[in-house]
Amino acid sequence: MNIAQLLTKGYELLKEEDIDSYMIDAQLLLCKVLNVEKLFIMMNRNLEVDGEKEEEFLKLINLRKSKMPIKYILGFSEFMGLEFKVKEGVLIPRPDTEILVEEAISIIKEKSFEKVCDLCCGSGAIGISIAHYTKNTKVYLYDISETALEVTEENIKGLGVQHKAQVYKSDLFSKAVEENHTFQIVVSNPPYIRTEVIPTLMEDVKNFEPYIALWGGDDGLDFYRTITFQSKKVLEKGGYLAFEIGHDQNMQVEEILRNEGFINVYSLKDLAGNYRVVIGNLP
């Protein structure tokens, strides 16, 4: 088959499964197999594709048909203008999270903060982006998942921030407390999905993304309570705690921060107008 025929076949197979992004997904998968840019496949539609590549493309199409997220198949995800490696076992970075990172960077620059913590780091997208876009910062990234640690380490090296960012295995702040590390700002996108909501998630998410990175307890707030309480052991005076939240959690998370003594607590909305970030600081 030539490129045009292969793409048509890919479109048909994905469309059958009601995958809305069937066209762009098929194009991206063919680009991956041929190791070319999208413009190449648009400009060379009559180019014959050898049998081996054809087979490889259809294998990837079948993975996408099974609702495996396209980012896992491609092996990378774009975030904050940087390319992060991702694979099954780490949460795929979302554009919504950029709101949290941009606000954290703004605080860091305004306050000239240097000591930063990314807790529940996953792929490392938050902490590594902060390291990349700020000067004089030292970023400590923590996660309990071996896959997350491995992927974050690869991204630290791949994006050239080894001198500014380090990743450690830790159950929340246990490693930081053990090593007497303190921070001026803690940034976290913890698991926050309520038990009852998990079964209603899109197949791409509930069947492939790590449960450990999604489930936040019966009311979705378990990690906010624990992290906020524990953060007082590692945050310096005047330090900030910045969370990503679910769209309907801003009131509860603000209350958790205030109850633990945080002041100047505020929420921010994402581009869709949903609350996405809660931030407070220690007096």
Image: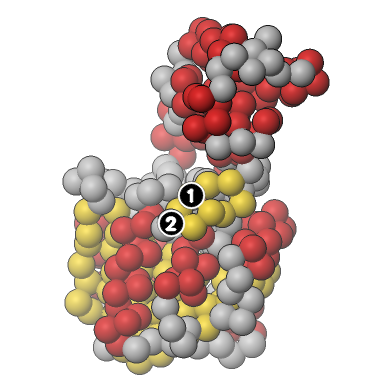
Give the distance between the C-alpha atoms of the residues marked 1 and 2, in whole angstroms: 6 Å
Q: CB under 8 Å between callouts 1 and 2?
A: yes
Q: Amino acid at mark 1?
A: Glu
Is residue 168 left or right of 43 when viewed as pictured? right
Residue 152 vs 44, above or below: the answer is below
Q: Does residue 64 lie above or below 194 as drawn?
A: above
At a point 22% along the width and 62% down the height, the residue shown is 267
Q: Quadrant of the N terminus?
A: top right
Mark 2 crowdedness (10 Å alpha carbons): few <14, some 14-19, many ≥20 = few
The residue sitting at the right extreme is 52
Residue at left 47%, top 20%?
23
Q: Secondary structure at mark 1?
A: strand
Q: Nearer the viewer, residue 281 or 159?
A: 159
Query: To which quarter of the image does residue 211 belong?
Result: top right
Which residue is under mark 2? 81
> Where is residue 162, by image quadrant?
bottom right
Q: Position of residue 88 (x, y in %)?
A: 65, 42
On the image, numbered disc 1 is attached to which residue?
Answer: 78
Question: Please, what is the three-letter code of the amino acid marked with disc 2?
Answer: Gly
Q: Which of these two is toward me, 78 or 89?
A: 78
Judging from the image, what secondary structure is the residue with disc 2 in? loop
Q: Is residue 186 left or right of residue 144?
A: left
Question: Which of the image's four quarters has the C terminus?
Answer: bottom left
- Residue 120 pos. (x, y %): 54, 62
Considering only vertical position in the picture, is 211 above or below 174?
A: above
Using the image, determine if residue 112 lies above or below residue 80.
Answer: below
Horizontal and vertical percent for residue 250? 25, 56
Say which mark, if any, is on residue 39: none
**Residue 139 in sight here:** yes
Colour pattern of the rendering: secondary structure
